Image (spheres, rainbow, N blue to C red):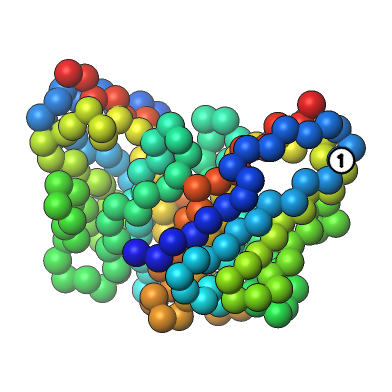
């Protein structure tokens, strides 16, 4: 079964600095996808970045990058130049197959990021 | 990206009543819809997966008779919480995916249910 572990319940960062949110995973599938979502206090889930297990390069999307270390089974999210609007919950997730052929998401417990001015 | 809506965004009901939550994909046809539940300060937990025209597949520990899911069309899925009790108070979020989007999941804005 797939498992996602986020060991940081909360993180603080100064505005304009970079921050790394940790995520480790466990799966026996040779092919898998890893996702990061942001959830502000409003509750909506905002997709940030995706990394496929066979992708040769680490994924990047604007200020977000994913530090993918396959041997260590880690997929840490790096946010550069933090902004006050980055304050939110961040969830790491992994795709898992379902009986119907679609893919469900298994989420970690999340990390609450607070950006200080 | 594709847009998914949920209605209502908030609902308060008395214990024992049933509540229906709608999830719609507004600009694409969703072959699969997912229903998640999130308790305060916790993660999202998948409740069930539904494919259009077929019965939903429930995760272990989720009562299918209590949480009725209907996926009647490629753009609409409903979750009905039957005989709701205070312990059912939670944030319910749906997501939708389609083969044409390589099965990426698009999330609705969520529904906050409070059972008095």
Which residue shows up at 57% across the image and 30% down it?
B40
Question: In this view of the protein, can residue A99 be seen by the observer?
Answer: no
Which residue shows up at 74% across the image and 62% down it?
B69
* Horizontal side, residue B33 vs residue A74: left or right: right
* Horizontal side, residue A90 vs residue A117: left or right: right
Residue B71 x %, y %: 69, 70
Which residue shows up at 30% across the image and 30% down it?
A87
Q: Circle 1 is placed at which residue position? A: B17
- Give the number of marks: 1
Residue nearest the viewer, comparing B63 with A54: B63
Which residue shows up at 40% across the image and 65% down it?
B2
Question: In this view of the protein, can residue A10 be seen by the observer?
Answer: yes
Residue B23 x %, y %: 60, 59
Q: In the rendered structure, the residue with mark 1 lies on which chain?
A: B
Point out the image quarter for the C terminus of chain A.
Answer: top left
Residue nearest the viewer, comparing B42 with B67: B67
Q: Residue furthest top?
A: A117
Q: Secondary structure at mark 1?
A: loop
């Amino acid at each position: 079964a797939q498992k996602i572990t986020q060991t940081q319940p909360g993180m603080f960062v100064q505005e304009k600095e970079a921050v790394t949110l940790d995520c480790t995973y466990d799966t026996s599938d040779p092919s898998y996808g890893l996702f990061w979502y942001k959830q502000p206090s409003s509750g909506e889930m905002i997709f940030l970045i995706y990394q496929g297990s066979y992708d040769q390069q680490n994924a990047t999307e604007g200020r977000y990058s994913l530090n993918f270390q396959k041997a260590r089974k880690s997929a840490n999210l790096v946010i550069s130049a933090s902004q006050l609007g980055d304050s939110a919950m961040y969830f790491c997730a992994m795709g898992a197959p379902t009986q119907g052929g679609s893919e469900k998401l298994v989420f970690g417990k999340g990390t609450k990021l607070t950006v200080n001015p | 990206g594709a847009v998914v809506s949920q209605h209502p965004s908030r609902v308060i009901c008395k214990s024992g009543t049933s509540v229906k939550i709608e999830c719609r994909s507004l600009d694409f046809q969703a072959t699969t819809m997912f229903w998640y539940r999130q308790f305060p300060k916790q993660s999202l937990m998948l409740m069930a997966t539904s494919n259009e025209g077929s019965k939903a597949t429930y995760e272990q520990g989720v009562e299918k008779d209590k949480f009725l899911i209907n996926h009647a069309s490629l753009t609409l899925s409903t979750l009905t919480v039957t005989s709701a009790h205070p312990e059912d108070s939670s944030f319910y979020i749906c997501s939708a995916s389609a083969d044409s989007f390589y099965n990426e999941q698009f999330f609705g804005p969520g529904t906050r249910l409070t059972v008095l």
